[in-house]
Image: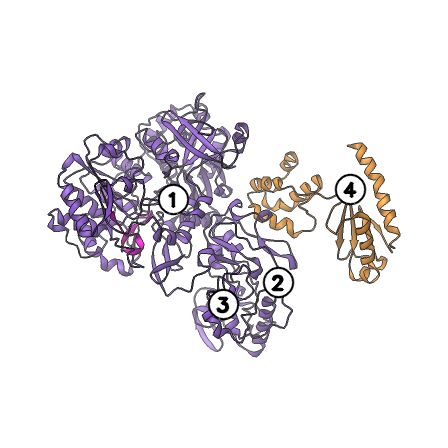
Chain colours: A purple, B orange
Amino acid sequence: MKITIDGKTIELEERKTVLEVARQNGIYIPSLCDHPRLTPFSGCRLCIVQIKGRKGYPPSCSTLVEDSMEVVTKSPGLQKLREEILELILAEHPNACLICSEKEKCDEYKSTIRKVGETTGCVLCPNNGRCELQDVVDALKVDRVRFPSLYRNLEIKKSDPFFDRNYNLCILCGRCVRICQEVRGASTLAFAYRGSQAVVGTVLDKPHLESGCQFCGACVDVCPTGALSERALKYELLPEEKAVTICPLCSMGCELEVQVREGRILSTKPSDQGVVNQGQACVKGRFLIRDIVHSPSRILKPMIRVQKKLEEVSWDQALDFVAQRLKRYKGREVAFVSSSQTSCEDNFLFHKFAREALKTENIWNPAGFSPLSLFSEMVRENGLDSGLNFRISDLSKAKVIFLVGADLPVSHPIIWLELLKAVRAGAKFILVSPIAYALNRYAAKWLQVKPGTEYHLFNCLSKVLLGNEEGEKADIPQGLDALKKTLAEIDLSQSIKITGIEEEELEETTDLLMSAGPAAFLFGMGLAQGQNSSAGLAALWNLARVREAQIFPLGLENNLRGALEAARNSSAKGSAFNLAFHAALPADIKALYLTGPLPGLEKTKLEFLVVQDSFMNENTEKADAVLPATTFAETEGTFINAEGRVLKFVRVIEPQGEAKPDWWIISQLAQKMGKEDFRFKDASAVMKEMSKAIPGFSKMLPASLENDREVFIEEEVKGEKKPVLPLTDPPHAVAGKKYPFLMFLDYSLDYYRNLNLCQEIRGMSLIRDSRWIKISPEDAKKLGLMDGEKLAVDSTAGKVAGLVKISEAVPQGMVVASFLWNEEEDFSREKLFSAQGNPFMSILPVNIKRGM
Amino acid sequence: MERERKEFMVDQRELIHILHEVQNHYGYIPPQAISQISRKLRISESEIFGVLTFYKAFTLHPRGEHLITICMGTACHVRGAPMILDEFKRKLGVEPGETTGDNQFTLETVNCVGACALGPIAIGDGEYHGQMKTRDVDKIIEDLKPKKGKSAKNE
């Protein structure tokens, strides 16, 4: 296809809109409502062009190119029309500064006068300098507005966390409404009212907190004016530099554009070039990074305990002290706690250090408790044919999606966006969850299973699919006779009763499951938390065999894959030690080295405690030595995301205080302990050794990661596609008379190393407070409980406190708690679950009552 | 309301239809209805809010027993509709869009009812009164009131 724009001949293969083609060829057409990720809207009318042979002035954003089309984008007529359209837009937008003849000289003063409440011109606008409307006014050189100016005097909304909404500045381009609906699937924002009253808003004008908002910030990012503006940027000047790095706050690995001024992070935005996230992120990556990196809890200097007090010392002194003391302990007397939130290089050195310098196999690895390790253990033990790697983009090709145990918009936001695309393209989405998450709206079938009984549900589904002896359902793969025979022993109506699902729903679900096309089975922490999680997972695997589906195991931490890979290749004792360690600190351990959070630690048994972290918490108070580590923003390295993709993150600011990267601290310490092969000059040097030592990391070389973002962890997949048998039917937690409620954990990864984000950042605590105990409105009414009241939770494992949060998402007879620890010890859930020896066993019968 | 709703297919295209039913049944759209419809039809509450505020047929506040609508179209306007409206406002003690304290009368304005030759026009509970004079206002209000007595007895 060949078209001409302004006399320039352009050849193209795909059919695109005129505006897209013009942009790609460097031809500027002003536009305010169009956005590359949204469907054309033709609302602002600024992108009008002339096309030979067509009447009038079609908008280029919604006009598709045709062969031998002749387009004119600049002419006196178009300029006049556009000016007039822009003047109409400006009539309802504060415009004094936009058209002011003195605006060039105003620059020096604007930061000081921005503190007024109302925005009546650009100098008072939080988005000054970041505004697309300003750019368009400059491009069209509009210097007057002939229409009377109208200020709508709408209330400025400041009650929500992270951003303000000032609809007096809104030009009704609808980008926020469309991105919320089309891309994020939340539909929190909509156009309300009509004509001159039209305004963007939420249901009944409620705050975003009460309207199902995820606070992903996508609306703020697409807003072409200051109507939606990030509150933290309000008094900030423009950034001096921008750098691109990887977010460490979940397993997606979103690429973030970090804005820096005077060595400080101003803001982070999802990068449009992000190979995983493509311009999207979530509340954590978008709004929390700045507050995390510049947190007042940061540890800035090395400290050692001198006569019962922690004192700041030099790095040399601190390292000498730690090295001398650690030399006293050997083997079983010392243990190391690694972190899945640090880089692959760090994790590799943690293991090397424990093995070679501490001479211990006691390395506790938090990756040991995750859907990933559960899955890979099952695969290894049974000789199955499956790896952990997948591609998020595979999801949008799926025609059947079966999701168990994850609130994706919160835990895996980018996977959620891909799933939404698949659902919009007609995929059948089946959801298994006891909780009424917001995403249930998109499910073709929502199976509200009782927590911990998924095992029975999957077996029933497999049984129905495999059919009875006489008739088999079509398209069932061969070689499942053994499974069929085993399932024949299951009494369907008995089994299904346990799950709380109606028998008719099974038929409905299997019909959906057998829809044509590839199937994807996703599972998250929700499935991994019952006493019978491995049995549940085996049943899911069998169901996936019957349907011939790919399984996507979804872990939580940013570098869980990397940490798991490093742990697998180490001689650490693995899960047995993990279990014992989690239940209680083994008695023979005298010295402990922490690089991650370990709530509820009892110092009394320990002689020596080292904390290497970026943030102060209760454990740093107990420590004998505190070594300040940098955050991800001040160092470089690699993370491996949920897909198994290797992502390189880079240093965007100088280290805060005297903080040093984890790999540096470990290698210096090892050298002080007399280990000479810890001489690494930078993270790349660690990577080189790591790629030789660990087969999974063999493709990770500094040179190949420079430009290639398609490097994946190496996996050896061998084994059979066979069902896991025999089936075991372990017990599941049931509510009883003494403990009439089932407590279920809400897995949202709201921590970064020692920092509980919900406690540190006020905005976050409004969205998800880690102290909340969510309860259904019906149960709250029965018990006479109000939002925010203090609640006592009693169970066989112990007592914890919580704050009442009434939520319609929670079914009757259940309460939902965060799995995060808390600074106020009363509220620390971790204690409750580790008391059972296995954090997987986190479905717990409890009783609740007011007060404490 | 639940029963009525079951008669509809659970189809997002039925939204306006359902809103009409709710509006007819309650005289307005209660906030709980928005959440219920949202769950049934799987449309976000904000989107439902967007639709219902777009149409004048739906209201978020209870309307009075009787609805009085004054045409403010061009023809009615030049023939003295503002004076008629003022008279209604004074007699009922409410502004357009408001409802009297006893929940009996709601006063509304509309931009044309298409009967310009008869202007100025007032509509009382669907009954058109053409060529209105200010002295007719009392009569319309009084005529509507007996109905109120009846409905009070029915309740």
| Magenta region | A625-643
Count residues near mark 1 (Cα–Cα under 10 Å), then give few for <14, some for 14-19, many for 20+. Answer: many
Label 4 Cα crowd, 10 Å radius (few <14 / some 14-19 / many 20+): some
**A6 or B63: nearer the eye?**
B63
Q: Nearer the viewer, mark 4 or mark 3?
A: 4
Q: Position of residue A312 (x, y in %)?
A: 24, 49
- The mark found on residue A667 in the picture is none
Magenta region includes residue A141: no
Between discs 2 and 3, the one toward the N terminus: 3
Q: Identify the residue under disc 1.
A: A750
The Cα atoms of the two marked residues, 1 and 4, are separated by 54 Å
Q: Amino acid at mark 2?
A: Tyr
Real-space CA distance between mark 2 and mark 3, rounded to the nearest whole angstrom: 32 Å
Q: CA distance from mark 1 to mark 2?
A: 41 Å
Determine whether, in the image, residue A779 is placed left or right of residue A412: right
Q: Is residue A581 above or below residue A97?
A: above
Give the residue pinned by disc 3.
Answer: A19
On the image, the x and y values in percent for residue A148 come to 65, 69
Q: Amino acid at mark 1?
A: Asp
- Residue at the spot of label 2: A151
